[in-house]
Image: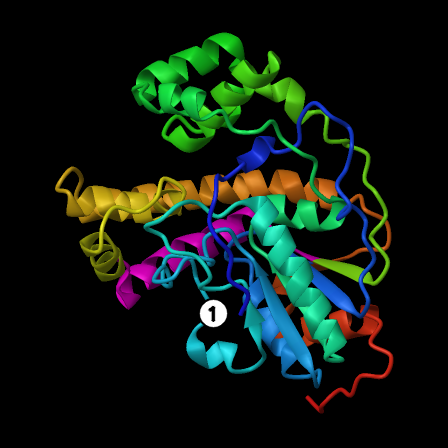
Amino acid sequence: MVRFATGFLEGEYTRVSTPRRSSDAQEPFNGPTLLLAGPTAGGKTALALAIARRVRNIEIVSADSMQVYRGMDIGTAKPTPEERSVAPHHLIDCANPHEGEFTMAQWLRGAREAIDSAHARGAAVIVVGGTNLYVRALLEGVVQAPEVDPTLRQELESLPTAEARARLEAIDPEAAARIHSNDRRRTLRALELHRLTGKAPSVLRTQWSDTPRPLPEGLSLVGLEWPVDAINRRINERVRTMLKRGLVEEVRALLAKGPLTRQAIEAVGYREMAEHLAGRVTLEEATEETKIRSRRLGKQQRTWLRRFRLIPNTLWLDGEMGPEALVERVLGYWPLKGFTLTER
């Protein structure tokens, strides 16, 4: 498992004024690499494991910004130890939820290292996309953001959330409409970028080209699609299952070790259950808010996925097809010359 020091989460506005791309952009992959994309609760992990059971010598890389945190298992739908025994997993449990942040740039470096190491061992790789910003970074690389100004950061951190929101609404109503009113972290990051660049965050955001680029050499992309009603039912059922598995107890145990970082506490379900444990809302209210935030996340993901769908030579499948049919379709699309497939 690759481990990294933590740093500042750059968030959705990582790509800013300079058009220069890093050396990671469009870097080819040295072996067969499959990227699985799809909405939350859409069955990506189950499909990855089903494929791993059919392909000998395969490894899995998580592209989930919250599964990196140790102890945050139930609420992030992290693969269980039994599921992880099917194939080596990477970029899970590699950060402390009580210290610092884990950045997209850190994830990209770790993902490329894990993928390259797996290929050097002769393994194929599945990247399971949970955070679509990470998916896009893998597809297109990372552009440098303005360096953090500690004095400015301290100044913005002192702002009450309501005042920060009011400032963002004044300078960039479009960004304010896109960033949830309770998302303090991205609100402050947007204000910071405005101060550092003199440009509205929504303008900076458009500087990441909307023209889909071809897949890097060696990378294949499969996307799972779901009708809105069907995925919302799955989301609601996932939240109920998490509560039964002990989400409240998991959050209680985490908070007993100290406050979570501002990034970790934003994981869907954790902030809501922390509010419940603090006595500010009932369990029923926290559960309903978790469902609402999960469905809102699903809606945001559908916007990302519509763009990914325009990338040439990708495969998009109906998530309701059933696991066996999905696996067969994926194996028929993903070039795995030289790899041995087991029987169904």
- 240 w.r.t. 13: above or below: below
**Residue at position x 23%, y 46% in the image:** 274
Q: Position of residue 107 (x, y in %)?
A: 58, 52
Q: Secondary structure at mark 1?
A: loop
What's under tag 1, amino acid-wise? Answer: Pro
| Relative horizontal placement of residue 326, taking residue 334 as reference (left or right) | left
| Relative horizontal placement of residue 279, taking residue 140 as reference (left or right) | left
Snapshot quadrant of residue 116: bottom right
- 232 w.r.t. 53: above or below: above
Residue position for label 1: 79
Q: Position of residue 52 (x, y in %)?
A: 64, 78
* Residue 74 on the magenta segment: no
Q: Position of residue 49 (x, y in %)?
A: 59, 75
Q: Position of residue 288 (x, y in %)?
A: 30, 44
* Residue 243 on the magenta segment: yes
Q: Looking at the rendering, in which quadrant would you find the C terminus?
A: bottom right
Q: Main secondary structure of the magenta part?
A: helix
Q: Furthest-top residue in view?
A: 170
Residue 38 is at least partly visible in this image: no
Choose between 324 and 50: the one closer to the eye: 50
Q: Furthest-left residue in view?
A: 279
**Residue at position x 71%, y 82% in the image:** 55
Residue 302 is at least partly visible in this image: yes
User: How is colour applied across the structure in the image?
Assistant: rainbow
- 261 w.r.t. 156: above or below: below
Snapshot quadrant of residue 164: top left
- Within 10 Å of disc 1 (Cα), the crowding (few <14, some 14-19, many 20+) is some
Q: Furthest-bottom residue in view?
A: 343
**What range is drawn magenta here?**
223-247
| Relative horizontal placement of residue 16, taking residue 71 as reference (left or right) | right
